[in-house]
């Protein structure tokens, strides 16, 4: 389901014309509001790709799980390393699983 | 593209060290010899022995090894020598890595040797991972101008100009007034020697006029500055003088012909007390405050319409009443800002009635009165001054007062002492009363205080709360409590002098706007007062004199010379830049401009494709851009994000053995790193759980690296930076504190204890604090249990 922006943490990428989440969203759904905070302008069109969550430098965006997949406590949180991505998956019973993947395979 | 496989020469220079005592060196060397890319691994017994270094040189020359990794405790001198000798054999200095396991506590006694051996191996493997990624680098050389722009031709500007001209640099002095000299030209004497300031100013001006290297642009302001340090283009707007400088010889015929009398300035004491002195200033008059340049100037706003008397009178035809303003562009390598101060508008301190009562004057006006030779007793003395017998001085008018100026202007006490001494020495009959909070006469200025006391100046430690003028005589009645006698002191004064403080001049705020220089809360230029007092936080722009801080003339001159010396770096025709500057990976960068916004020195500019690129001359190589890039697209050469990630990835997170937590610390090399090293050198019981990485500034730590460390299984990540307001790079510590706080919030939602990421500020000698905080941190981490990512 659509990304939620923490308005305390979002700094609108310091009032740039296009914040990072707007640049990165494949559906061009993120926009900068009049208060210079990012928001999702077409919540139903979001694919939950989580690109915006990964790129936000302030950690201000999170996506809520679609209710068909899990509700309430269920969460999926990415943490970006230099060459890896670490996923934390919390199911509806609060069980936690963690995965780490290399995300950029560059020639040595 | 053929990828070259690195061939590392690994040398352990640990003979006789504490490292050797705790760690089985031979076994370690055997292990390391089998590590990836290690071409030669050896234990070096004695580095002084020339055969060792010669055999390494041979290997370098023959290409058997192409980079060297030294393990051991080296002095800066040894490192320099090794680098120099191997550079002669053709090895780039940036292809050498030095690792000292002892500074990380491997030499400490009383710790399980197995732990220390594992820690030593972990440390060496980390640096080995970095060594593999080293690339050769060469210093860059940028062309630079050898001219300098000095904004403000006051005492600081003139002294800086005079010393730069002596060094053969081209100097452009830009002055807003019609003549040079600034505020000091308005003084009658300067302390401590009580000589005439015009002598000190003319001394500089003579030097400047004797050389073609100096150009004085009066009636001019800086309206724009483009370019980089070493190659600035300054746009200068010169107002019309209406007198041609090349023709005017200063004969003064025009002045006699001019029909208009003008006041010097609206709140001029000489104007307000007409019974004392009559000014004879005309609309055309010599340059002010000093008649340098010699050409006269016309104040057209005072001219009657169509009056051309001066032009008719001028024998050389120098008056040109149709002269237009002129804009020039100057190519300069550096800018010195010496825009000085203005007196605080003391009419705001209403209780003393400045500008309401004719006999209340400011200390700067007193200087002008003294400069006109009043208070003398000889036959030349102006008779209207003879009946001035009682003079009062009120100190700290508006200064050290939360309603006005919260700071001390530092010169007014000594200035008052100087004036009182001056008056007393001219005419001992005059009574001087000084009303003060306390006298601040630092250093040898105390001599002036003693002199004033011996001359019979009365000091009273209470400032009057109001002034009551006598309606008939105009004398000023003042009643204060004399605290020594605990009795009221009543005096009737002929003249009251208010010692007002200094505020940044109007030019200072204008220049701050034009050149985008940060100002402090009082409006003076921001400065790192202790380590780099002359720097303005914009590379290539230096600040001196009272534009930075209220200071006396002698300090202003010192600061001017300091700024001139620092500016020399950009005036040598070429600037050598260390190659450890940041580089933007254009494949990763998406032009979010965060690096441009948050660079403490605003050193990023757009390249032709719209990517941010550091202006090498302005960059201080602190690495804050690397730390804050959300895409890890910015890297400092020789401390690249890849090299750091390789180091973080190579940490063996179980080197402590269960259940002891492992901590990775990123320590700022200026303070926190030195505190950590000091703790080991002092033999403090540093817990072995921590492995640290030295970073140029705590702000250079990217969140991705912290995430790497955590997902690699490190139990705790410590970032050691400076205290608030002490960061060498202005705000690196604040930036990283904010970012790591955001990351900690994310950890919380990941069901990982946010306390695993911690920012601590450490001063350079905080070795004890470092040990204490590690201990408490370890206890906390033990209570949390191991990092869930730990294998």
Image (cartoon, helix red, strand yellow):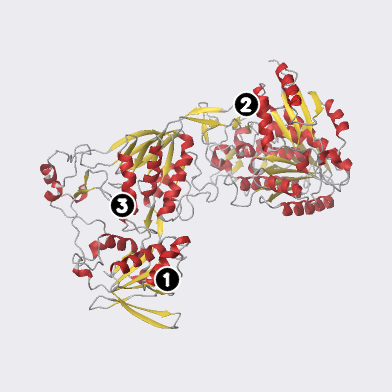
Q: Residue at x 32, y 44 (%)?
A: B205
Q: Give the x, y percent position of residue B702.
A: 67, 39
The numbered mark 3 sits on a residue in which chain?
A: B
**Of the residues under marks 1 and 2, which one precedes in the sequence?**
2
Query: Which residue matches tag 3?
Result: B198
Foreground pick, B599 / B221: B221
Left or right of residue A36, residue B2 in this image: right
**Numbered disc in front, either 2 or 3:** 3
Mark 1 is surrounded, within 10 Å at the Cα level, by few (under 14), some (14 to 19) or many (20 or more) other residues, namely many
B84 lies left or right of B358: right
Tell me the CA gap for discs 3 and 1. 30 Å
According to the picture, the residue beneath numbered tag 1 turns out to be B436
Residue depicted at 60% across the width and 27% down the height = B586
Q: Would you call the spot at circle 3 few (<14 residues within 10 Å), some (14-19), or many (20 or more)? A: some
The residue under label 2 is B137
Q: What element carries label 1?
A: loop
The image position of residue A72, as x and y in percent, is 77, 47
Is tag 2's residue or tag 3's residue first in the polypeptide sequence? 2
Tell me the quadrant of the picture where the C terminus of chain B can be found.
Answer: top right
Viewer-side residue, B55 vs B605: B55
Residue at the (13%, 45%) spot, across then down: B310
């Amino acid at each position: 389901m659509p990304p939620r922006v923490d308005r305390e943490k979002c700094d609108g990428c310091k009032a740039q014309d296009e914040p990072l989440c707007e640049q990165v969203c494949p559906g061009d759904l993120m926009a900068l509001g009049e208060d210079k905070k990012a928001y999702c302008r077409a919540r139903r069109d979001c694919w939950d790709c989580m690109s915006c969550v990964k790129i936000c430098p302030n950690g201000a965006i999170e996506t809520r799980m679609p209710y068909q997949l899990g509700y309430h406590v269920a969460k999926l949180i990415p943490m970006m390393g230099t060459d890896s991505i670490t996923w934390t998956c919390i199911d509806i019973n609060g069980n936690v699983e963690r995965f780490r993947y290399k995300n950029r395979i560059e020639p040595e | 593209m053929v990828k070259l496989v690195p061939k590392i020469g690994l040398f352990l220079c640990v003979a006789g060290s504490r490292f050797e005592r705790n760690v089985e060196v031979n076994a370690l060397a055997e292990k390391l010899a089998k590590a990836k890319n290690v071409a030669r691994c050896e234990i070096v017994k004695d580095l002084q022995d020339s055969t060792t270094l010669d055999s390494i040189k041979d290997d370098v020359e023959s290409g058997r090894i192409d980079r060297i990794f030294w393990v051991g405790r080296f002095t800066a001198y040894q490192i320099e020598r090794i680098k120099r000798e191997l550079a002669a054999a053709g090895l780039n200095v940036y292809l050498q890595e030095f690792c000292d396991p002892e500074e990380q506590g491997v030499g400490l006694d009383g710790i399980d040797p197995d732990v220390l051996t594992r820690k030593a191996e972990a440390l060496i493997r980390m640096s080995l991972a970095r060594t593999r990624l080293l690339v050769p680098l060469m210093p860059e050389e940028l062309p630079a101008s050898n001219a300098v722009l000095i904004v403000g031709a006051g005492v600081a500007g003139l002294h800086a100009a005079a010393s730069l001209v002596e060094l053969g640099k081209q100097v452009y002095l830009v002055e807003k007034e019609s003549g040079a000299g600034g505020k000091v030209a308005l003084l009658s004497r300067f302390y401590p020697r009580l000589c005439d300031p015009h002598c000190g100013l003319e001394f500089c001006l003579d030097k400047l006029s004797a050389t073609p290297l100096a150009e004085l642009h009066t009636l001019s302001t800086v309206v724009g500055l483009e370019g980089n340090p070493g190659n600035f283009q300054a746009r200068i707007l010169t107002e019309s003088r209406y007198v041609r400088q090349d023709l005017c010889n200063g004969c003064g015929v025009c002045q006699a012909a001019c029909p208009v009398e003008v006041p010097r300035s609206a709140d001029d004491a000489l104007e307000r007390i007409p019974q004392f002195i009559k000014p004879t200033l005309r609309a055309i008059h010599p340059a002010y405050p000093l008649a340098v340049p010699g050409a006269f100037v016309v104040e057209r706003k005072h001219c009657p319409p169509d009056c051309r008397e001066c032009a008719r009178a001028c024998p050389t035809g120098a008056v040109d009443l149709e002269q237009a303003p002129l804009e020039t562009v100057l190519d300069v390598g550096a800018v010195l800002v010496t825009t000085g101060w203005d007196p605080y508008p003391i009419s705001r301190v209403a209780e003393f009635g400045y500008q309401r009562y004719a006999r209340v004057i400011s200390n700067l006006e007193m200087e002008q009165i003294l400069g006109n030779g009043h208070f003398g007793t000889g036959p030349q003395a102006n008779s209207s001054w003879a009946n001035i017998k009682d003079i009062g001085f009120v100190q700290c008018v508006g200064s050290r007062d939360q309603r006005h100026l919260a700071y001390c202007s530092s010169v007014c006490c000594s200035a008052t002492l100087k004036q009182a001494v001056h008056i007393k020495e001219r005419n001992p009959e005059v009574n001087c009363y000084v009303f003060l909070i306390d006298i601040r006469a630092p250093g040898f200025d105390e001599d002036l205080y003693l002199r004033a006391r011996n001359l019979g100046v009365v000091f009273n430690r209470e400032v009057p709360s109001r002034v009551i003028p006598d309606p008939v005589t105009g004398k000023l009645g003042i009643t204060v409590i004399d605290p020594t006698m605990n009795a009221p002191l009543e005096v009737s004064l002929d003249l009251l002098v208010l010692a007002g403080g200094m505020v940044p001049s109007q030019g200072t705020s204008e220049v701050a706007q034009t050149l985008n220089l940060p100002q402090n809360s009082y409006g003076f230029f921001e400065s790192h007062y202790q380590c780099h007092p002359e720097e303005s936080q914009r590379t290539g722009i230096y600040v001196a004199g009272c534009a930075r801080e209220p200071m006396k003339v002698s300090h202003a001159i010192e600061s001017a010379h300091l700024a001139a010396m620092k500016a020399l770096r950009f005036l040598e025709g070429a600037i050598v830049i260390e190659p450890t500057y940041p580089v933007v990976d254009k494949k990763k960068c998406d032009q979010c401009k965060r690096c441009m916004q948050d660079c403490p020195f605003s050193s990023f500019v757009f390249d032709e494709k719209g990517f941010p690129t550091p202006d090498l001359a302005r960059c201080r190589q602190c690495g804050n851009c690397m730390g804050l890039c959300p895409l890890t697209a910015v890297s400092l050469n020789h401390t690249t994000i890849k090299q750091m990630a390789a180091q973080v990835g190579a940490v063996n997170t179980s080197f402590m053995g269960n259940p002891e937590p492992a901590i990775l610390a990123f320590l700022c090399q200026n303070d926190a790193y030195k505190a950590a090293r000091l703790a080991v050198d002092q033999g403090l019981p540093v817990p072995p759980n921590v492995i640290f990485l030295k970073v140029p500034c705590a702000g250079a730590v990217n969140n991705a690296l912290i995430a790497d460390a955590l997902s690699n299984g490190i139990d705790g990540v410590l970032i050691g930076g400076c205290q608030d307001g002490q960061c060498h790079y202005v705000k690196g510590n604040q930036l990283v504190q904010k970012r790591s706080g955001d990351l900690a919030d994310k950890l919380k939602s990941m069901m990982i204890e946010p306390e695993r990421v911690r920012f601590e500020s450490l001063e350079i000698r905080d070795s004890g604090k470092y040990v204490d905080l590690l201990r408490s941190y370890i206890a906390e981490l033990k209570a949390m249990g191991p990092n869930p990512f730990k294998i």
